[in-house]
Image (cartoon, grey):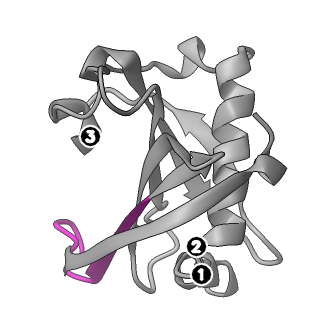
Amino acid sequence: MSSASLSTKVGGESGGTCDCCGQTSKTIWGSVLAAEQTVAVYYVQWTIGSPQHYPNIDLVLGRWGEGTVASDRALVALQYQPRSGGGSVRVIDAKGRPPEHSEICGAGLARADVIGTPLAQNAFDVIDAIWLGDARIAEMRSLDREA
């Protein structure tokens, strides 16, 4: 899978309040497709105006559709680290991330289970597709100007 062959299907969004600072937080979600087949579902959560609260990006990767079950998919968690001039994304442990406790995936993967594997490239290809295909991500990336 390469990011050039992927597209996004924008989903919903919700807002709330950050538990630690009281600022407004936002979550967006959608799916990533290859040849019209879902290959990932994503959730991106950030605290508006607070670059010190690294945004979380949860990717549920694997097989989707009829005949599949949650154990066909795994959760890969990443953090966006805003920086002046453009931030970076890093893989983190997925244990405890909200999608891990849902019926959407089988397991949350540790960072060590992702880095250095083909799954890491898949995750970064999906991130590229989200960056290019979901215009809402620009709001999160605006944290770079505040970092």
**Label 3: element kind:** helix
Q: Amino acid at mark 1?
A: Ala
Examine the image and state in which quarter residue 20 appears: bottom left
What are the residue bounds of the magenta stretch? 17-30
Q: Is residue 22 magenta?
A: yes
Using the image as rendered, state which of residue 142 and residue 31 is in the foreground.
31
Residue at 58% from the left image edge and 14% from the top image edge: 112
Horizontal side of residue 105 vs 143, given as left or right = left
Q: Position of residue 83 (x, y in %)?
A: 72, 70
Q: Which residue is mark 3?
A: 99
Examine the image and state in which quarter residue 30 appears: bottom left
Residue at 65% from the left image edge and 70% from the top image edge: 133
Q: Amino acid at mark 2?
A: Asp
Question: From the viewer's perspective, is the residue at label 1 or at label 3 nearer?
Answer: 1
Residues packed near mark 2 inside 10 Å, few (<14), some (14 to 19) or many (20 plus): some
The CA distance from mark 1 to mark 2 is 4 Å
Q: Which residue is mark 2?
A: 134
**Label 2: element kind:** loop
Query: Which dot marks residue 31?
Result: none
Q: Is residue 20 magenta?
A: yes
Viewport quadrant of the N terminus: top right
Q: Are marks 1 and 2 in contact (CB under 8 Å)?
A: yes
Q: Position of residue 63 (x, y in %)?
A: 45, 25
Q: Which residue is mark 1?
A: 135
The vertical placement of 53 against 146, above or below, is above
Q: Position of residue 44 (x, y in %)?
A: 43, 61
Residue at 40% from the left image edge and 83% from the top image edge: 48
Residues packed near mark 1 inside 10 Å, few (<14), some (14 to 19) or many (20 plus): few
Residues packed near mark 3 inside 10 Å, few (<14), some (14 to 19) or many (20 plus): many
